[in-house]
Image (spheres, rainbow, N blue to C red):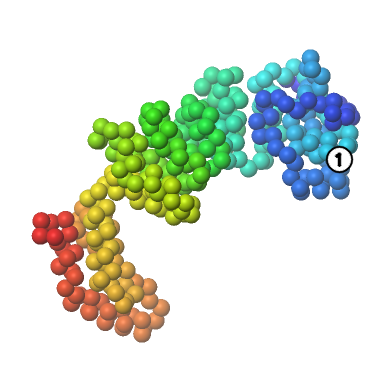
Amino acid sequence: MLLTSEIFTASATSIRADGAHLFWAEKPSDSLTESMAEFGQASPVLVRETEAGLTLVAGHARLAALAAAGQPVLARMVEDADDVSTGLLYLADNAQRPLDDGMRLAALQYFAPRVDEGVLRQDILPRLGIKPKSKDARFLLAWLGMDKEWQALLTAGNVPLAAVSPLARMSVDDLAAVKPLFTGLSWSRSSGVNVLTWLFETATMHGVAVAEVMDRAGMNAALAQGLSPKDAIARLSTAARQARHPELTRLQERYAAVAAEITAGTKWRMTQPDSFETGGSELTIQIKNGEQLKQAVKDLENMAASTAWDKLWSLGSRDE
């Protein structure tokens, strides 16, 4: 591949901008349009000669802005470029662009049929800001095997990158069952992975389909209630966790109620730190002066006399 030093002028309509390597192509931003209107085209677009005429290699936003303004285009010729080198040049031209997981996946989708996996991992991923041996590298490569609808959900930001681990273990029917959870909701990394893992593990433990687990847990009904995204995700996460860990969930809810009874009227906060493995509790408080410290000590003494502690000590026992 040769990037020539000659810069020439061409009409915007004479340059085709429909190549598959333009995987991040989008309309020009207002700031770019305003800048080009004020100062003109600061850097040329890159083009190559094909049987169809001049074809854009890089500079889609600049070309679109100039076309909209009816202005000629400064272009620089690329010679002897195959599909891989064209894609690499496009990456280089966009090297300062902030990337999200959907953009990285789009780039991998372009290169995957054109290079082997070793090149994809060792050469292409680092150009996308991903270390070859990282978890994110493994996740991105796994996303190449997901269907287009799931890939679109990743690109839209609805499903987190790491969710591919539980998703890849699911059957076609299971994937269809969980897809509505992400169609209209954007999940965080931990919440999305957790809810999928809980559903898959529960279904596997009981030998039923994920759809049945969701139905029994009331998740399909929750989806139909028209809750706000935040409330819907909280409700669905709680339902999936209860389905997977019913006894732990019961203990957590019971503990929270008793802790609230013990600390009522104080600024003390009480938590169970280790999923009831030891039966212990943590008490915390923030104080800013001596008076608050005296009150905290007084409240602690009153809390120690509460009869509700007996309920706490017996959590999970036959005497509960």
- Work out whether residue 109 or residue 235 is closer to the camera in this orientation and state it: 235
Query: Residue at the location (28% across, 33% down)?
Result: 208
Query: Residue at the location (32% across, 69% down)?
Result: 269
Task: Return the residue at label 1.
Answer: 69
Query: Residue at the location (44% across, 42% down)?
Result: 181
Q: Quadrant of residue 289?
A: bottom left
Query: At which x and y percent is residue 79?
Result: 77, 19
- Work out whether residue 292 or residue 198 is closer to the camera in this orientation and state it: 198
Query: At which x and y percent is residue 202?
Result: 29, 39
- For residue 201, say whether it is visible: no
- For residue 212, say whether it is visible: yes
Query: At which x and y percent is residue 249?
Result: 27, 53
- Work out whether residue 264 or residue 87 is closer to the camera in this orientation and state it: 264
Task: Work out which quarter of the rendered image holds the C terminus and state it.
Answer: bottom left
- Work out whether residue 219 or residue 104 is closer to the camera in this orientation and state it: 219
Query: Residue at the location (34% across, 46% down)?
Result: 218
Q: Secondary structure at mark 1?
A: helix
Query: Taking 297 as reference, is 34 above or below it?
Result: above
Q: Residue furthest top?
A: 51
Query: Taking 220 as reference, is 291 above or below it?
Result: below
In this image, 157 relative to 263: left or right?
right
Query: At which x and y percent is residue 316?
Result: 16, 56
In this image, 84 relative to 214: left or right?
right
Mark 1 crowdedness (10 Å alpha carbons): few <14, some 14-19, many ≥20: few
Question: How many marks overall?
Answer: 1
Q: Residue furthest left?
A: 319
Q: Quadrant of residue 129?
A: top right
Task: Work out which quarter of the rendered image holds the N terminus and state it.
Answer: top right
